[in-house]
Amino acid sequence: MVEYLGAMRADRLVALLLLLQRRGTVTAREAADELEVSVRTARRDFEALSASGVPVYPQVGRGGGWRLLGGGSTDLSGLTSSEARALFVAAGRSLDSHPHLQAALRKLASALPEPFQTDAEEATVAFHFDDTTWGGPDTPAPPPLLDAVTDAVIEAKRLRIDYRSPRSGLSSREVSPLGLVSKRGIWYLLALTDHGKRTFRVDRLDDVAVIDGRVERPASFDIDTEWRDVLENVQSIRLTCQVEALIDPDMAWALRWLFGTSLDVVGHSNDDRLHVRLAAHHNEAMAAQIAGFGASVELLDPPEDLVDILARTGQTLVERYGPA
């Protein structure tokens, strides 16, 4: 059920809690009608909230239904600080696809008890969930130190981290956490260091420890904008082969799955094909990724080295699998 909560649409989760807050007792049928889902889905939503630790419980008999502990008081006092924090972090998964959810979360935060409001509000501005991939199916398990880093981000605490870089090995440094980003299950810490803003993969942290000092997040800090800047920087460094192409619309989903954020839609051609921009680490990687699509992908003014690799690949396939 906890896994189900993670996949639950954030707008529905918030709406369900606001419904409980407003009415006190809500049946699965009433929730289903209000949220425009099936009764079975509404019941599973209630059960998921309860299983995850949110104080929601069923009341049987005449006039029964689901209630918040404490009678659904207007301040949602049944929620603990940790539960409120977890709720807002989980809800952040759908902020990009639901433009009104940020305002809804802020309204809910204002209804929380005063001691919980800061944590809840921090969670709405310090987390970003990127559902695209770097170019493959990334769904790893959460890193061991994620909870400790999450606490530091929300509670504005400075950290000393032991970080293992693929290039420079293990090092220790002091950082001021600004936010966390989950890119299809890979977590990144955005932080201020003595050398400016840096991004750290959380699964490469060997150790973290809270140190003296409180983090003052800049008023201009916007995690969505910061993450876009990180992506653009990574693209410019890692993806040296970039080409434009016309693709069959039916193949767009497969190319998106394969290229992830390395595919940008430019527009449409006169024959209703999609005009896209593709990027890869080098020509060999680009050729390997698109060769299997055959005529479904037409490159526009590709570099000669890439054309040569594709031609050799095609010739090899003809020699191996063509007519005897």
Image: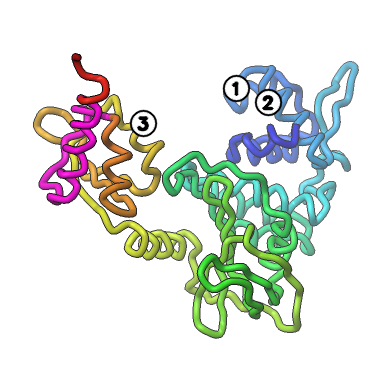
* Residue at the disc numbered 2: 31
Q: Amino acid at mark 3?
A: Ala
**Of the image marks 3 and 2, the number of the one nearer the N terminus:** 2
- Where disc 3 sits, the SS reads helix
Please give the name of the residue rendered at 36% of the width and 31% of the height, measured from the top-left corner.
254
In the picture of the structure, the residue carrying the numbered disc 3 is 254
Mark 1, mark 2: which one is toward the viewer?
A: 1
Query: Contact (CB < 8 A) between labels 3 and 2?
Result: no
Contact between marks 3 and 1 (CB within 8 A): the answer is no
- Residue 75 x %, y %: 78, 51
Position above or below: 184 against 206: above
Q: Quadrant of the C terminus?
A: top left
Distance from Cα at disc 3 to Cα at disc 2: 37 Å
Question: Is residue 324 shown above or below 192?
Answer: above
Question: What's the magenta region?
Answer: 293-318
Q: Residue at x 62, y 52 (%)?
A: 107
Answer few, some or many: residues within 10 Å of disc 1's Cα (few below 14, many 20 plus, some between 14 and 19).
few
Q: Is residue 29 magenta?
A: no
Say which residue appears at 78% left-offset and 29% top-offset: 47
In front of the other: 155 or 130: 130
Measure how far apart labels 1 and 2 are at the Cα level: 8 Å
Looking at numbered disc 1 in the image, what kind of residue is underneath it?
Answer: Val
Q: Is residue 270 left or right of residue 19?
A: left
**Magenta stretch prevailing secondary structure:** helix
* Residue under label 1: 37
Which residue occupies the foreground of this view, 131 or 216?
A: 131
Q: Secondary structure at mark 1?
A: loop
Residue type at mark 2: give it.
Answer: Ala
